[in-house]
Amino acid sequence: MSITKNLQNIISSIPPTVTLVAVTKNHSVENLQELYSSGHRQFGENKVQEMMDKYNALPKDIEWHLIGHLQTNKVKFIAPFVTLIHSVDSLKLLQEINKQAQTSNRIIRCLLQVYIANEETKFGFSLNEVVELIESGELEKLDNISIKGLMGMATNTDNESQINEEFAGLSRSFNILKNKPVSKNVTFDILSMGMSADYKMAIKNGSTMIRVGSLIFA
Ligand SMILES: *Cc1c(COP(=O)(O)O)cnc(C)c1O
């Protein structure tokens, strides 16, 4: 396995405007150190405890993305350092993030996770719920939150046209929301979609941030 080479291959295959979050879940601190040494700084983890352990063990200029389901009682552990929470799936969670961000004297950037897959296991809002949330006026009360966009995961399937449709649908909604003035803490400029198996299709559909794990550590 050559982490550095894999990383370079991926970076050279994506436009410079697309951000690569290296998904480091289940990988050792030594492997993350190698990724760091090759110059990468955007790391993604899906579990709070694992992210904290790695944050404590590694250099402090790494930017940590939380990409997995987040329980409200765990927000306080990551609030002091997390760079972007991709997996916001309720107003209650946003309110807790806001509270903990206040305590840490920070503004925490968040994405709303949208449920686009044809699977029952995935968390997230429906697109209607996102629109309702935005129109509810609740977001503007959250002074320590900055909503930066949407995150979605396509169905885990070999059916490429289905994946393509799911990404295209999310992208259409993203572009509509982007042009809708809401409040100063809501600006849609990040569309987080695409993983190892489908990131090329995600980029074709307008993704600005991909979350790739297994390809880097293959
Ligand atoms: C694990 C994970 C990824 C990366 O998946 P790979 O197939 O390993 O690239 C991306 N997003 C989320 C939310 C994940 O949990």
Image (spheres, rainbow, N blue to C red):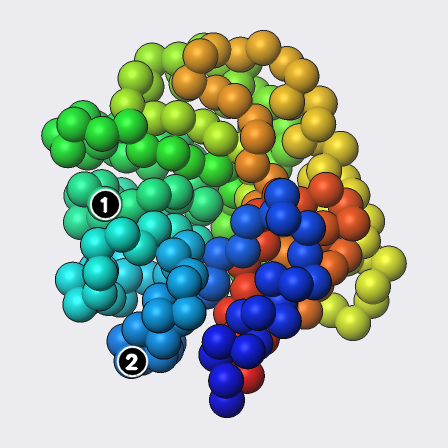
Residue 155, image quadrant: bottom right
Q: Which residue: 39% across, 26% down?
A: 146
Q: Which residue: 54% across, 33% down?
A: 149
Residue 55, image quadrant: bottom left
Residue at which label 1 appears:
81
Circle 2 SS class: helix
- Left or right of 116 in this view: 102: left
Residue 119 position within the rendered picture, expressed as x and y whole percent measured from the top left: 64, 59
Residue 144 position within the rendered picture, expressed as x and y whole percent measured from the top left: 28, 23
Instruction: Give the spatial CA distance, label 2 vs label 1.
Output: 21 Å
Proximity of marks 2 and 1: CB atoms separated by less than 8 Å: no
Q: Amino acid at mark 1?
A: Phe
From what the image shows, is residue 72 above or below residue 180? below
Residue at which label 2 appears:
30
Q: Is mark 1 within 8 Å of ligand 1?
A: no
Front residue (pair 163, 7): 7
Front residue (pair 130, 204): 204
Q: Amino acid at mark 2?
A: Glu
Q: Earlier in the sequence, mark 2 or mark 1?
A: 2
Label 2 packing within 10 angstroms: few (<14), some (14-19), many (20+): few
Residue 190, image quadrant: top right
Q: Which marked residue is nearer to the observer: mark 2 or mark 1?
A: 2
Give the tally of numbered discs: 2
Residue 200 position within the rendered picture, expressed as x and y whole percent measured from the top left: 73, 59
